[in-house]
Amino acid sequence: MFSAIDCTLVAIRKKEDPMNSIASGALTGGLLAIRSGPKVMAGSAVLGGVILAIIEGVGLLTSRWMSSVHDPTFNSY
């Protein structure tokens, strides 16, 4: 479900960025809890979005850190 929503958002928005994953996590969380009622559905949607935002944030920080550690233009000698 997550991948289907993510691919749909990429097709609609015509760009692939972290917002697609965050929105996909929120929508997936909400849709999976749809039978539990609106309150639980909203809570699951928020939780899904927050979890994906944390994952995307850690991914961005890690990639920035790794690019600064491995600088091919740095000459140590």
Image (cartoon, helix red, strand yellow):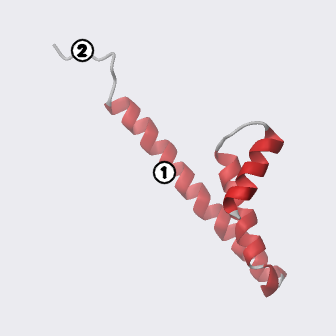
Give the image location of residue 70, x and y in percent: 32, 29
Question: Which residue is found at the position 68% from the left and 61% from the top?
Answer: 2
Q: According to the image, label 2 marks what residue? A: 75
For marks 1 and 2 on the same chain, the one whose residue lies earlier in the sequence: 1
Image-quadrant location for residue 67 = top left
Give the image location of residue 41, x and y in percent: 77, 77
Q: Amino acid at mark 1?
A: Val
Q: In this picture, is 52 found above or below 43?
A: above
Residue 58: mark in rendering? 1
Q: Quadrant of the N terminus?
A: bottom right
Q: Amino acid at mark 2?
A: Asn
Image-quadrant location for residue 51 = bottom right
Number of numbered discs on residues: 2
Q: In whole angstroms, how far apart are the C-alphas of marks 1 and 2?
A: 29 Å
Give the image location of residue 5, x and y in percent: 75, 57
**Element marked by disc 2:** loop
User: In the visual, does 27 lie left or right of 52?
Assistant: right
Question: Which residue is found at the position 45% from the left and 36% from the top?
Answer: 64
Mark 1 residue crowding within 10 angstroms, few (<14) / some (14–19) / many (20+): few
Residue 11: mark in rendering? none
